Image (cartoon, rainbow, N blue to C red):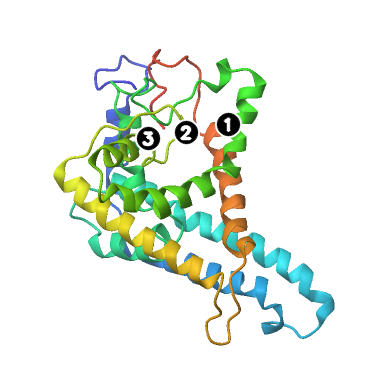
Amino acid sequence: MSDSHATPGEFSLSEARTIVGEFFSPNPWIYWTDFLASWTVGVATFMLVDFPDLLTSNTAWHWPLRIVAFVVSSLLYYRCSLFIHELVHIRDGQFMAFRFVWNLLCGIPFLVPTFVYYTHLDHHRRKLYGTKEDGEYIPLTHLPARQILLYLSQVFVVPLAAVFRFGLLTPLTWISRPVRDWVHRHASSMVMNPQYLRPLPTARVLRIIRIQEFFCFLWILFIALRMFFPLGHYPRYSPSDVSTPHLLDGHVYYCAEPSAHPWRTSLGQQRRGDDVC
């Protein structure tokens, strides 16, 4: 990261922020419109995956429609989930209604409540970037091909790990402090480095975590019940209904992240300018 005393001809981050400073203030109308439109169309197109007859009675079009609807809905769900990045960068106390609605409609149903991404801010701190305290840094360019493939294969494990974390480990954290601390350090962060250890939370952050993970637990319980019992005219959920959007979104995330970072140094060897991301 370049400092404010950049020499002539050298990029100055502080100067760039001054130039575009007016665009750094988030516009609530853009956030609400973008998120709610993406979520609404995403839900509508995902319904067409199970009920293509809502759009056409011609059975020849049902499978093509299902495929297109699935891809569109998954990408829109992915777009909705990306708001978690914006929320952790917005100051505490701002966008409170939006934070609540985002967690209600997206964060909790997809088991990515905002607290799992709080650690992202460490990725932008000069003293932590590219170190073991930065959970989003992996020196991919220094790794053999098999480890890169292992990194990409996490997409098949993460959805199940999230269900295990919120569905089984969460109740255990209510009765055991050692389990609570272990789960927080090892299984409460949306990071790229599986060896990352999250610092223990403050009392205030812990309250937020407990509330959000409690509702994630209730959501998993609801989904589990819906897999065995129909709800009115709606059939039971199948495992594919729940898991396939997560898998596609996960593939997009794990493929997009490496292209968004330079990964030019080994862990702990920070380079100037690498943390402007």
Residue 144 against residue 137 in the figure, above or below: above
**In the rendered image, which residue does mark 3 sit on?**
186
Residues marked 2 and 3 touching at CB (< 8 Å) = no
| Label 2 packing within 10 angstroms: few (<14), some (14-19), many (20+) | some
- Locate residue 77, reporting x and y percent: 52, 59
- Locate residue 146, reporting x and y percent: 66, 23
Could you say whether the residue bearing mark 3 is in a helix, strand or loop?
helix
Q: Earlier in the sequence, mark 2 or mark 3?
A: 3
Q: Earlier in the sequence, mark 3 or mark 1?
A: 1
- Residue at image position (49%, 45%) is 161
Residue 135 against residue 32 in the figure, above or below: above
> Label 1 is placed on what type of residue?
Tyr
Front tag of 3 and 1: 3
Front tag of 2 and 3: 3
Q: Relative to 101, is 94 on the left or the right?
A: left
Distance from disc 3 to disc 1, alpha carbons, whole Å, reads 17 Å
- Residue at image position (31%, 42%) is 118
> Label 3 is placed on what type of residue?
His
Could you say whether the residue bearing mark 1 is in a helix, strand or loop?
helix
Q: Is residue 31 visible?
A: no
- Residue at image position (41%, 64%) is 219
Residue 10 against residue 103 in the figure, above or below: above
Residues marked 3 and 1 touching at CB (< 8 Å) = no
Q: Earlier in the sequence, mark 1 or mark 2?
A: 1
Could you say whether the residue bearing mark 2 is in a helix, strand or loop?
loop
Residues marked 1 and 2 touching at CB (< 8 Å) = yes
**In the rendered image, which residue does mark 2 sit on?**
192
Q: Quadrant of residue 17?
A: top left
Q: Which mark is residue 151?
A: 1
Distance from disc 1 to disc 2, alpha carbons, whole Å, reads 8 Å
